[in-house]
């Protein structure tokens, strides 16, 4: 019998990503006798986030809360997950494609000697072996992956499983000991610098305004990209070129190696549209591109294009939309 | 100390990607490169040595005969010797980690520095799996690495979803490179010629214990859905109207 455990962490991308993970889980266990469970790994959760986790339709919500997880290292988390998986007999693990999922899950897989499928965007569990779809080569192709192993793990792209769902039931909660005491890890958490932002989270925002290299400096980026994002209650994003040249923070990079977003509206200003950037935004519902070069590749994915200098076009848009 | 840098031969991201009639990737005429993230990892290793670190740098690649080209490029960048594990089938990350662990058993490196992901498979798993298999500390998505003077620890700054994080790992450890760790150098022709004399060892997969089956199979590929053609608008006012519609 299959037993699926969805892993969520305290730093994770929030209820949006957790709901997507639950939607994926429901798709995967569609023909099973039993449903899926959720395991929270992190420091003590708030009552509100517990209530959220219990509304996702899981058979059970396990809570592995330990203050040591506030300074979570992959080494400790993977060890705790391994112990739990063996003790409870789970054979399938799933997590969001967050930096937690990407860091911890492959390590846990190695400890359990099971394969993993990254960035799942679709699952068909109606046949004898489940078939997963995942983008490869910066999204230029979709690979169809058949899994005959009964034990495996996957990370799931939240944007691909964002469906309307009815909050269902109230899952029972069970506390689990992390077993962390007594583990001497070779990895020590030293510190973190988190960029605080009053804007919505990039991964889950309904509107994203992104800027590229021609923004020149962080003040101009903030005034133009930030200003337009605020008009639309959106998040800001950036290209690698903008991050590398210090125009925008690293956690705002959208693309193959940054965040993957699929908002209702994505505005790309001064962005050429490299294959690596497109990989992170081309599934957005409506794409708008503003670029001085009418031949820029970004226009090939845009629903609406404007050939213009962003230094004049964006202030105009801000005043028109305010 | 010894630094092991695993590298993968990957298609150039600017090469056209087509599908064959039986839904496989058509790699005919494709240009091949060292996976950019692995190149970044190697660049970092070479820079550490140029900054005074006493280190031997060994590159290893698991791949077809032609992967020797990419290993030679790495020798030209500054690696001291290369190991080529000849393998013609495509591997899942858990299988790659299995083979790399066998290489580690003979090479006994103090640090494994590798790319966070390969730009063809885009899985982002192998480094973490290798670390888990070896029971070594891991620091993924590194943007800076500082190795202690006595070579027993490294402080790694990492790029995470919420910003940056700093870890200290005991060596030996696995560190995976993010984009901003180092910018790979341009290698001039004389270096490529000189590198021909650097040693390259050939190892068979069977010498490493073979590849265990893992029950995951890519059965084929398809093109992503294409987007409907868009419209060009004459001015900011008409664009503002469309933006308003989209956020309604
Ligand atoms: C391994 C690897 C991974 C990568 N991962 C990512 C990733 O995750 N995300 C990512 O974004 N990139 C990534 N890149 C980088 C990518 O290849 C491009 O270099 C980058 O996306 C280009 O950023 P850009 O569009 O801001 O800059 P450019 O390509 O320089 O484009 C600037 C654009 O602005 C236009 N422009 C100039 N002036 C103005 C103006 N005044 N008004 C309006 N338009 C103007 C120009 O016409 C041009 O089209 C990766 C690269 C590699 C090798």
Image (cartoon, coloured by chain):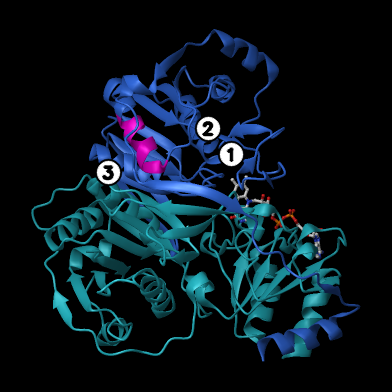
Chain colours: A cyan, B blue
Neighbour class for label 3 at 10 Å: few (<14), some, many (≥20)? many
* Nearer-N-terminus badge (3/1): 3
Q: Which mark is residue B183?
A: 1
Q: Is residue B95 magenta?
A: yes
Asked whether the beta carbons under mark 2 and mark 1 sit within 8 Å of each other, the answer is yes
Q: Which mark is residue A275?
A: none
Q: Quadrant of residue A254?
A: bottom right
| Chain letter belonging to callout 1 | B
Circle 2 sits in a helix, a strand or a loop, which is it? helix
What stretch of residues is rendered in magenta?
Answer: B92-101
* Nearer-N-terminus badge (2/1): 2
Please give the residue where the numbered disc 2 appears in the rendered image.
B43
Q: Residue at x 85, y 85 (%)?
A: B238
Neighbour class for label 2 at 10 Å: few (<14), some, many (≥20)? many
State whether discs 3 and 1 lie on one chain: yes
| Quarter of the figure with the C terminus of chain A | bottom right
| Chain letter belonging to callout 2 | B
Placement of B145 over or under A173, stated as above or below: above
Place of residue B85 in the rendered image (x, y in percent of width and height, measured from the top left): 43, 23
Place of residue A268 in the rendered image (x, y in percent of width and height, measured from the top left): 71, 68
Q: Is residue A223 magenta?
A: no
Please give the residue where the numbered disc 3 appears in the rendered image.
B132
């Amino acid at each position: 019998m299959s037993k699926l455990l969805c892993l969520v962490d305290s730093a994770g991308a929030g209820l949006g990503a957790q709901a997507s993970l639950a939607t994926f889980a429901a798709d995967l266990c569609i023909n099973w006798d039993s449903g899926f469970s959720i395991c929270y790994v992190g420091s003590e959760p708030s009552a509100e986030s517990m209530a959220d986790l219990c509304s996702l339709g899981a058979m059970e919500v396990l809570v592995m809360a330990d203050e040591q997880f506030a300074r979570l290292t992959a080494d400790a988390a993977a060890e705790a997950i391994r112990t739990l998986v063996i003790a409870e007999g789970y054979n399938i693990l799933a997590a969001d494609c967050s930096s937690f999922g990407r860091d911890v899950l492959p390590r846990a897989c190695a400890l359990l000697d099971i394969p993993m499928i990254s960035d799942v965007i679709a699952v068909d569990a109606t046949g004898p072996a489940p078939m997963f779809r995942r983008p490869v080569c910066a999204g230029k192709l979709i690979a169809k992956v058949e899994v005959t192993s009964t034990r495996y793990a996957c990370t799931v792209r939240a944007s691909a499983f964002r469906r309307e769902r009815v909050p269902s039931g109230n899952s029972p909660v069970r506390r689990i000991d992390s077993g962390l005491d007594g583990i001497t890890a070779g990895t020590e958490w030293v510190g973190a610098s988190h960029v605080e932002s009053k804007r919505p989270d990039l991964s889950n925002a309904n509107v994203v305004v992104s800027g590229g290299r021609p923004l020149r400096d962080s003040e101009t980026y903030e005034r133009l990209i930030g200003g337009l994002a605020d008009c639309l209650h959106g998040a800001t994003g950036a290209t690698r070129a903008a991050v590398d040249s210090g125009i925008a923070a690293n956690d705002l990079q959208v693309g193959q190696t940054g965040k993957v977003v699929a908002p209702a509206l994505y505005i790309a200003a001064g962005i050429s549209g490299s294959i690596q950037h497109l990989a992170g935004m081309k599934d957005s519902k409506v794409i708008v591109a503003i670029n001085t070069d009418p031949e820029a590749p970004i226009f090939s994915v845009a629903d609406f294009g404007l050939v213009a200098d962003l230094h004049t076009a964006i202030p105009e848009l801000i005043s028109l939309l305010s | 100390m010894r630094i092991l840098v695993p590298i993968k031969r990957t298609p150039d991201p600017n090469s056209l990607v087509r599908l064959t009639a039986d839904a496989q990737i058509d790699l005919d005429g494709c240009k091949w490169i060292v996976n950019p993230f692995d190149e970044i990892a190697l660049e970092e290793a070479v820079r550490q040595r140029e900054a005074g670190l006493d280190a031997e740098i060994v590159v290893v690649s698991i791949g077809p005969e032609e992967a020797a080209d990419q290993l030679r490029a790495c020798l030209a960048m500054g690696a001291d010797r290369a190991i080529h594990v000849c393998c013609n089938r495509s591997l899942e990350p858990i299988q790659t980690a299995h083979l790399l662990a066998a290489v580690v058993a003979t090479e006994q490196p103090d640090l494994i520095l590798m790319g966070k992901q390969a730009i063809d498979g885009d899985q982002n798993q192998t480094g973490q799996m290798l670390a888990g298999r070896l029971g070594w500390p891991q620091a993924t998505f590194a943007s800076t690495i500082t190795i202690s003077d006595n070579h027993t620890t490294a402080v790694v700054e990492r790029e995470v979803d919420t910003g940056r994080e700093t870890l200290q790992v005991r060596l030996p450890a696995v560190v995976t490179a993010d984009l901003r760790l180092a910018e790979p150098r341009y290698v001039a022709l004389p270096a490529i010629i000189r590198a021909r004399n650097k040693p390259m060892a050939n190892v068979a997969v069977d010498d490493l214990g073979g590849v265990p089956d893992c029950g995951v199979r890519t059965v084929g590929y398809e093109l992503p859905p294409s987007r409907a053609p868009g419209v060009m608008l004459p001015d900011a006012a008409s664009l503002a109207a469309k933006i308003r519609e989209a956020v309604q």
